Structure formats: C-alpha cells, structure tokens
Amino acid sequence: MLQPFTLLVVSHLSALVLAQDQTFAFTDSDVAVSQSSILTHRRGNLQLAIPPGASCFNTLEGTIPTFDAEKCADARANWRDEQWHTDHPISNLWPLWTNDTCVPLGNSPSDSCTRGYYGNYVVLAKSRAHVKATIDFARTRNLRLVIRNTGHDFMGRSTGFGSLILNTHSMKEVVFHKKWTGPGNWKGGAATVGAGVQGREVLTLAHQQSPPLVIVGGECPTVGFAGGFIQGGGHGPFSSIYGMGADQVLSFDVVTSSGAYLTVNSKENPSLFWALRGGGPSTFAAILSVTVKTFPDVPSSSVILRINSTHTTDTEVFWKGFNAFHELSNRYVENGLYAYYELNHLYLNVRPIVGLNMTSDQLNQVVKPLFDKLDAQSIPYDREDNHYPTFFDLYTNLFEDNGAFIQTLVGGRMYSKTDFARNATAINAAQRFATEQGALIVGHIVGPGSGAPIVDNAIHPTWRNTSSFSITFVNLQGNATLAEKATAQNVITNVVGKALRQASPNGAAYVNEGDLEEPNWQTAYWGPNYPRLLSLKKTYDPLGVFYARTTPGTEDWEVIDVGTRLCRKL
Ligand SMILES: Cc1cc2nc3c(=O)[nH]c(=O)nc-3n(C[C@H](O)[C@H](O)[C@H](O)COP(=O)(O)OP(=O)(O)OC[C@H]3O[C@@H](n4cnc5c(N)ncnc54)[C@H](O)[C@@H]3O)c2cc1C
Ligand SMILES: *[C@@H]1O[C@H](CO)[C@@H](O)[C@H](O)[C@H]1NC(C)=O
Ligand SMILES: *[C@@H]1O[C@H](CO)[C@@H](O)[C@H](O)[C@H]1NC(C)=O
Ligand SMILES: *[C@@H]1O[C@H](CO)[C@@H](O)[C@H](O)[C@H]1NC(C)=O
Ligand SMILES: *[C@@H]1O[C@H](CO)[C@@H](O)[C@H](O)[C@H]1NC(C)=O
Ligand SMILES: *[C@@H]1O[C@H](CO)[C@@H](O)[C@H](O)[C@H]1NC(C)=O
Ligand SMILES: *[C@@H]1O[C@H](CO)[C@@H](O)[C@H](O)[C@H]1NC(C)=O
C-alpha cells in the first residue's frame, strides 16, 4: 500500500500564511529577492513557485497571470547561464527533472505553461527561524519538502512535484576563524559557511584573506558548498592532497526533522556528525552552516592536453592517446595531482591537470611518462603549460561555469586504484565503449585517499582507493516520449553503466553524480556504511520529512503517477 503526501494546494497556502503571521514574522519590507510583479504571488518571503520561464507565457496553469516582457527577455537571454538559474527561487539546471515544462524558447505567450515537476510554494529563507518554521510546517501538515540552494543536483533532488520548497540561497554569510579552537583536533584556520554560499563565492572570500586561503570545494564555480556537495562527499582540485569536502568539516549547525536546532561535531551529536559528512543530501538534517578547515593558498601549475579531430581522425590513434593519459591515474594522484577532462568520440580535452604547490618543472616530472609515451607512439596532441602565483588564479583562469538547460540522464563510476593496477586496459575499453554508445564522459583524476589523512565519516570507503571518477551523460530531446526516456535510461544503467561496473569490480558510485537506477544503490553509494546510515536515518528523521532519491531510507518511498506524487510504502 502507498500513502501519498498531501498535495500542497491553495487551502494549504492560507494555513502557511497563518503560520507565517505567527512564527515567520515576515513583513512586507522584508520582501524576497525576486520582486514578483504580481503581489498576490507572495507574502513576505513566502511565494507561489513560479517556473523561471513563466514570464514568457500569459498564464501559469491557465489561471495565474505571469507575462512580463522585460523579465521574459531576461529569461531568454540567460536561459543557458548557470548562475542565472541558481539565483532563481526554484529553477533546476536539468530540465528533465521539471518535465521540460514552461520553456521560454521560441514560444508564443498564449502557449501553455504548467508547473510540471516544480514545487507549488517556496520559502526564501533568510534566517534559521525561517528554516525551522518551514520544516515544522511541512512536518505537521504532511507536505513534501524540498531543500534547494542552487538547483544543481544532477539527479533532480532539488525540485519535486507538489512540494513546498525551502530555498536556502539567501543564507550567504561566511566567517573566517584565524585559529580554530573548537572540537576536531585542528589548530589551523577555519571558515563557517552559510547554506546559500556557492563554491566561487567562498573561494573568492578565502582569497581575500591575508594571507590568502583555500578551502576544498568542487570543480564547478556555481555548485553550492554546505548542502549537497558536503553531504554527498564532495571531491575537488584539492582532494588528492587534503581529501574530500566532507573530510574537512569541523562542525555543523542544523535544524533537525523535528525542528530542533543542533550543533553537530565530534563532541556534540557525534553520530549525526558522522552521517552528515557524506551520508546523503537532504537526508539527516537541514544544514544552516558548516565550519571547515582552511589552508594557505599555494603557487600552482597546470598542463592542458588536447587530442581531437583537428589532430587525428584515426580512431585507434585517438584511443591510444586517451589510454596513455588515463592508465597513469594512480601515478597522478599518488603525486597529489587532480585533473578534469571531457571525453567523447575523437575529443579529449584535459583542462586542466593541476599541480598544487608545484613549479612547472615539478609538474612536468609527474606527467613526463604520459608525454613520453604519446611521443614514442607518434600520437599528435596539443600541450599548454602555465604557472600561477596562487591556486585561485589558476582556478579563475581554467575552471568555467558549465551550461544550463542540458537534456541529459546521468550515471558514473569511481575507478579504484586496485582495478587500475590489475587491468587499466579494461577500464579504458569500458570508457571507449561508453562513448560508442553515445555517452559523453566528464572525468576527474582524483585521489582522496592518496596522501590525505583518512577521516572516519560516511563517504564510501572506496573513495580512499579511487584515482579516477567518471560521470556519463546520455542526451535526449526535450520532447522525448516516456518510451524514449526509458530507452536512454536503459543505456545509462544497463549498457554503459554495466560496462563500467564490470571493468571496475572494486569500484563504486557517487551519490551526487550517479545513476538514479544504479543497481543495489545502497551498496554502490555507501558500501559497508549503509546499515549504520539507515539506522541513523530512522533515528533522526523517523517520519521522512527530508527526501532525496537514492539516499538512506528512501527504499521505503516511491514516486508514482509518472514522476508526480511521492508516497510512503506501508
Ligand atoms: C556542473 C556541475 C559540476 C559539479 N562538480 C562537482 C565537483 O567538482 N565535485 C563534486 O563533488 N560534485 C560536483 N557536482 C555535483 C554536486 O556536488 C551536486 O550536484 C550537489 O548536490 C550540489 O549541491 P547544491 O547544494 O549546490 O545543489 P542543490 O541542487 O541545491 O541541492 C542538492 C541536494 O542537496 C540538498 N540540499 C541543498 N542544501 C541543503 C541544506 N542546506 N541542507 C540539507 N540538504 C540540502 C538538496 O535537497 C538536494 O537534495 C557538480 C554538479 C554540476 C551540475
Ligand atoms: C509531463 O509531460 C508530459 C508530456 O508533455 C505530459 O503529458 C504530462 O502531463 C506532464 N506531467 C506533468 C505533471 O505536468
Ligand atoms: C581541438 O584542439 C584544437 C587544438 O588544441 C583546439 O584549438 C580546438 O578548440 C579543439 N576542438 C574542440 C572541439 O575543442
Ligand atoms: C609547499 O611546498 C614547500 C616546499 O616546496 C613546503 O615548504 C610548503 O610547506 C608547502 N606548502 C603547503 C601548503 O603544503
Ligand atoms: C588500494 O589500492 C592499492 C593499489 O594502488 C592497493 O595496493 C591497495 O591494496 C588498495 N587498498 C584497499 C584497501 O583496497
Ligand atoms: C583486461 O581486460 C581486458 C578487457 O576486458 C581483457 O581482454 C584482458 O584479458 C584483461 N587482462 C587481464 C590481465 O585480466
Ligand atoms: C522532437 O523534436 C525533434 C526536433 O525538433 C524532432 O525531430 C522529433 O521528431 C521530436 N520528437 C517527438 C517525440 O515529438
């Protein structure tokens, strides 16, 4: 039997407005970031959830007037811009998770704009009291709650049909501590980062400290920091020397599913502390802020390697080139390197390989066997070397925002050092096979267990034996039928995913950049940590107030009626 959440409808809005008067204490001068032109669409920081393209349509759902020529022009001009979408109250970067609804490209205002899988109402939380009031309201009325900072989630977990959205994007405070004196056996510096802060923002503020600092953030400048990134694990350019994002955490401030404010660290609530570091986004608590270690910024070097159809159209030559690069993954991470690359048919763009605290000569020593092999095999390529006074300079020059509004399904695999040592050929053959099925690969050379101290937290232990992590993308048309979507999903899971799994029997999968249909996802995402996580989920969120697909405890839930209603299995 299934018990659905109550759908959030207008009668509930009046209840929330009431709750707002009593506990939110919003006033009209405390108006939300997004100045909706239709005053009736909002009450203080509580708003009707209006899809980001609605301004190009006369109405939402045929009843709510939404057309606004100026906003429509703005939406169209920025539709592929990540930062624009992350700043919108409810937008999601991956349109498949909104049912591709209300897209403002080439439409006429009289076309229909519906909510699809967007939520119904959104609270633009500015304080911890707003977060608590929203959680209490959702829990006591059995509403589906979705927490959102950036809408980055590849797996659609920051949007949800019929939901009340808790938007944390305004919680931008960052405080630096010169010398940490709290729990965690750490005497260096630290930073307390609010739930709404993005990677680029925290790195920029860290750079402005004297002396300049860095934190372990992600590759993409617009990814959030305290939310999905840390709770899912979080890998990035510093991971091969300092470990995962989750390994850096000294303390959290959270609101629990029962509405309690807790400080969570190695002294207070240590079990929850363990779970929040890698146990899954939106699963155990809502994060208000996270305190992480900071490190001194360092001079850094980079190498860019390109092999594409301008260099060779010989497929075998191309793959020899890729193999030469990838088979050295263990060597790179054991020397502290990180790399980000994109791989497709006759297209390899390794941009960049990062050598932290290295001169160009030092970095060249590590990558020399790669270039020696390319030269020995007469494989054509382009190489570009750079040196920067700080990592921050390298980052701002070489890491870019990705595009928004890409129609894609996602999967991925962590390749272990053990599997590389046993059979790198098999791993490379699987990568080639994936691209032959039409998949684009976004790869990361990253080794969070190759030099960094091992921290006891919830991330999959296989991260400690990883040297390369690939995301696979299979693209679709926005108008794809359900049957076409099912075919693409089958390719991701049972064709491409299967090949990657077979090539890396000692590998694992990553909950932030993985497949919603990953077989045995509990083990694939958490390995031996899963039973403890499931038990902690039952302790800290017995009612299932927090929900994000393929996270601990969600085997008890099911989305029915083609991606719409979320139900608890009875
Ligand atoms: C282009 C791109 C590049 C990426 N690069 C990297 C990378 O280099 N390294 C890496 O590890 N990952 C990377 N990711 C994946 C990223 O870590 C996840 O998408 C992550 O979930 C984003 O977190 P967010 O909070 O910004 O996103 P959102 O979509 O806002 O939220 C993601 C999930 O976290 C939950 N959540 C958000 N805030 C909170 C909160 N305050 N409390 C509780 N739950 C919360 C949401 O409910 C949702 O389930 C990348 C993703 C993209 C799209
Ligand atoms: C999702 O899109 C399909 C195809 O356009 C449509 O039939 C269906 O009603 C949509 N679902 C929702 C909830 O909007
Ligand atoms: C292929 O490599 C060349 C030379 O480095 C580069 O100029 C070009 O942008 C690359 N092509 C693509 C599609 O990236
Ligand atoms: C950078 O390398 C130098 C030696 O080359 C070392 O003294 C210093 O501690 C390193 N810095 C960091 C932050 O690791
Ligand atoms: C990790 O990888 C190395 C190969 O580099 C291997 O020797 C080692 O046994 C692995 N450790 C675990 C715990 O699997
Ligand atoms: C490595 O994998 C390839 C491709 O799957 C296979 O043909 C080969 O026999 C394997 N080699 C070893 C030593 O296991
Ligand atoms: C979707 O659009 C593409 C390009 O506009 C078209 O070729 C295709 O037939 C359409 N598919 C469906 C199912 O309508």
Image (cartoon, helix red, strand yellow):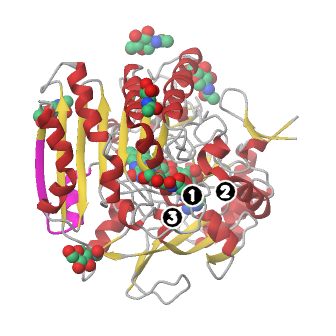
Quadrant for the C terminus in the image: top right
**C-alpha distance separating marks 2 and 1:** 8 Å
**Mark 2 or mark 3: which is in front?**
2
Q: Which mark is residue 529?
A: 2
User: Sequence-wise, which precedes: disc 1 or disc 3?
Assistant: 3
Q: Amino acid at mark 3?
A: Ala
Q: Is residue 124 visible?
A: no
Q: Dot 3, crowdedness within 10 Å: few (<14), some or many (≥20)?
A: many
In the image, is residue 384 part of the stretch drawn in magenta? Answer: yes
User: Sequence-wise, which precedes: disc 2 or disc 1?
Assistant: 1
Q: Is residue 348 left or right of residue 463?
A: left
Q: Is residue 430 left or right of residue 313?
A: right
Where is 58 relative to 13, above or below? above
**Mark 1 or mark 3: which is in front?**
1
Q: Is residue 418 visible?
A: yes
Q: Secondary structure at mark 3?
A: helix
Residue 106 x/y as whole percent: 35, 23
Q: Are marks 2 and 1 in contact (CB under 8 Å)?
A: yes
Where is 311 relative to 160, above or below? above
Q: Are marks 2 and 3 in contact (CB under 8 Å)?
A: no
Q: Is residue 472 left or right of residue 493?
A: left
**Mark 1 lies on residue:** 459
Q: Residue at x 39, y 37 (%)?
A: 424
Find the magenta span and give its range. Answer: 383-399
Q: Secondary structure at mark 2?
A: helix
Where is 331 relative to 258, above or below? above
Q: Amino acid at mark 1?
A: Ile
Q: Amino acid at mark 2?
A: Asn
**C-alpha distance separating marks 1 and 3:** 8 Å
**Mark 3 lies on residue:** 246
Q: Dot 2, crowdedness within 10 Å: few (<14), some or many (≥20)?
A: some
Q: Are marks 1 and 3 in contact (CB under 8 Å)?
A: yes
